[in-house]
């Protein structure tokens, strides 16, 4: 069984892909997943990657930074290759024009036809799903909600980035690049898998109830019956004028027991707060306080690896806000070192997918 | 009368998860993300018509007959 990772920081597409092909070597790849800086022309990159690995299903997306075992990178391409002993079957479906409509049902019919099983009846221990979404589409919640309605199979992934330019993001599949699109990949890992969701926050005993929201705009108008910013600032004990300085260190969490599903404030708009993901009317959210990303990730990953009894590869969908926090704390290398011993790739996302759409989290797929 | 909401939540979770603890937790999380606070309701909770209707819609969306 072989899972192999490599990367290139060569700014030219052809030399970069050639380097990658040489380093991957002669394993017979069944699937190639790659995450690439937006500095690479997306259509040319997708075509070149597929041409370099004609026997494999190639797929991936653009990023806001890349991750590989032992290094957090910028302006690079990171790649993970799977051979047929690590993945017994795989199918990818691109959902186009997602801003206009949700085509999860059609995508699922493709999977059902390929695997010969109903999505609702699939054994969740045998199938793993990956989702990559245009990170500027704002459609992640809707897509994840429909996926959750139609299957128990877990889809984990991230929202594509564009190096914080916020112009356009792309998903790649089978030699083509797509914007305003989402990619669903369903596969059967040959030896098992698990999913890890990890975030690094302490839960404070202060709650904010969203009384008035604009769901489509990911905006909260009122918390606790007051203008959202005023209530948030009051809960933190700071002035509304300075509230946005605390957004990264003090997001809010929808609590599932003691586990937060983080919703990160993006900006103030008048007295309103715009978030990076949905807050629904009536949601009760706990105020959070950021902690040690490196320690929490290492602890959670160690636990997950013990439960799975080791992994041959990890795909890490890592929030860009976590990357920025690590950079502020001068800890990117410490974070990357967590993954030194296991072939790992990942990218800095514009949002993470796990059951729903979340922020300031890493969702990881651990392949045994 | 009371406790209808808790009963509906329990039925949805039971039918969707089939007794699998992992799927029970996943289903509860899906309900939370759809705006239903699964921790808030007990057998004594008031029957809030809006929440009951929302749960019926959710059950239909996820293919569960109540």
Image (spheres, coloured by chain):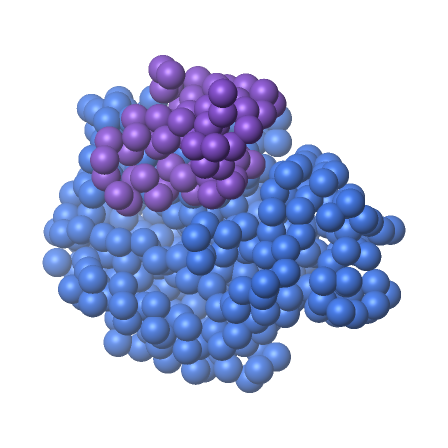
Chain colours: A blue, B purple
Instruction: Indicate the quadrant where residue B19 lies.
Output: top left
Residue at left offset 55%, top offset 28%: B46
Task: Return the residue nearer the eye: B5 or A283.
Answer: B5
Comparing A269 with A34, the one in front is A269
Up-down relation of residue A355 to residue A65 (above or below):
above
Q: Classify B9 as above or below A20.
A: above
- Looking at the rendered structure, the number of numbered marks drawn on it comes to 0
Query: What residue is shown at x 43% (from left), y 68% (from top)?
Result: A67
Any part of residue A343 in sight: no
- Could you say where residue A62 lies in the image, as x and y percent from the top left? 52, 54
Q: Position of residue A353 (x, y in %)?
A: 46, 48
Answer with left or right where residue A270 lies relative to residue B23: right
Q: Residue at x 36, y 19 (%)?
A: B64
Res. A106 image quadrant: top left
Query: In the rendering, at what x and y percent does residue A28 appear?
Result: 18, 53
Q: Quadrant of the C terminus of chain A?
A: bottom left
Q: Nearer the viewer, residue A283 or A243?
A: A283
| Residue beneath the point at 74% across and 39% down | A212
Quarter where residue B29 is shown:
top left
> Between residues A281 and A119, which one lies in front from this camera angle?
A281
* Residue B25 placement (x, y as % from top left): 35, 44
| Above or below, comparing residue A125 to residue A295 in the picture | above
Toward the top, the furthest residue is B65
- Above or below, A211 against A208 in this view is above
Q: Is residue A193 visible?
A: yes
The quadrant in which the N terminus of chain A is found is: bottom left
């Amino acid at each position: 069984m072989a899972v192999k990772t490599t990367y290139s920081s060569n700014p030219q597409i052809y030399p970069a892909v050639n380097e990658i092909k040489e380093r991957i070597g002669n394993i017979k790849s069944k699937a190639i997943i790659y995450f690439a800086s937006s500095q690479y022309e997306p259509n040319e990159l997708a075509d070149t990657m597929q041409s370099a690995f004609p026997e494999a299903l190639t797929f991936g997306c653009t990023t806001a930074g890349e991750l590989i075992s032992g290094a957090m990178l910028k302006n690079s391409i990171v790649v993970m290759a799977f051979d047929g002993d690590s993945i017994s079957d795989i199918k990818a479906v691109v959902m186009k024009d997602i801003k206009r409509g949700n085509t999860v049902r059609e995508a699922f019919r493709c999977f059902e036809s390929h695997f010969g099983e109903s999505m609702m009846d699939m054994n969740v221990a045998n199938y793993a799903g990956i989702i990559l979404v245009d990170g500027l589409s704002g459609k992640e919640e809707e897509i994840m909600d429909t996926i959750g309605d139609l299957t128990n199979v877990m889809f984990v992934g991230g929202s594509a980035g564009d190096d914080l330019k916020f112009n356009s993001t792309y998903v790649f599949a089978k030699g083509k690049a797509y914007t305003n699109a989402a990619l669903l990949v369903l596969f059967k890992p040959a030896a098992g898998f698990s999913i890890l969701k990890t975030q690094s926050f302490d839960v404070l005993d202060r709650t904010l109830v969203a009384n008035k929201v604009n769901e489509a705009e990911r905006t909260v108008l009122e918390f606790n019956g007051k203008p959202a910013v005023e209530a948030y600032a009051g809960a933190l004990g700071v002035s509304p004028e300075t509230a946005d300085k605390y957004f990264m260190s003090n997001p809010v969490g929808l609590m599932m027991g003691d586990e937060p599903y983080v919703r990160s404030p993006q900006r103030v708009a008048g007295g309103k707060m715009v978030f990076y993901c949905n807050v629904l009317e009536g949601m009760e959210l706990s105020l959070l306080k950021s902690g040690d990303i490196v320690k929490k990730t290492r602890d959670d990953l160690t636990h997950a690896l013990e439960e799975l009894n080791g992994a041959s590869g990890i795909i890490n969908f890592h929030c860009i806000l976590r990357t920025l926090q690590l950079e502020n704390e001068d800890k990117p290398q410490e974070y990357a070192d967590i993954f030194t011993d296991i072939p790992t790739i990942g990218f800095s996302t514009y949002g993470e997918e796990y059951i729903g759409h979340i922020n300031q989290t890493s969702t990881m797929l651990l392949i045994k | 009368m009371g406790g209808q909401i808790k009963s509906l939540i329990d039925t949805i979770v039971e039918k969707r998860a089939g007794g699998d603890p992992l799927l029970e937790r996943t289903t509860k999380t899906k309900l939370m993300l759809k705006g239903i606070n699964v921790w808030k309701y007990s057998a004594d909770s008031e029957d809030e018509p809006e929440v009951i209707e929302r749960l019926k819609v959710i059950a239909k969306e996820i293919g569960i007959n109540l």
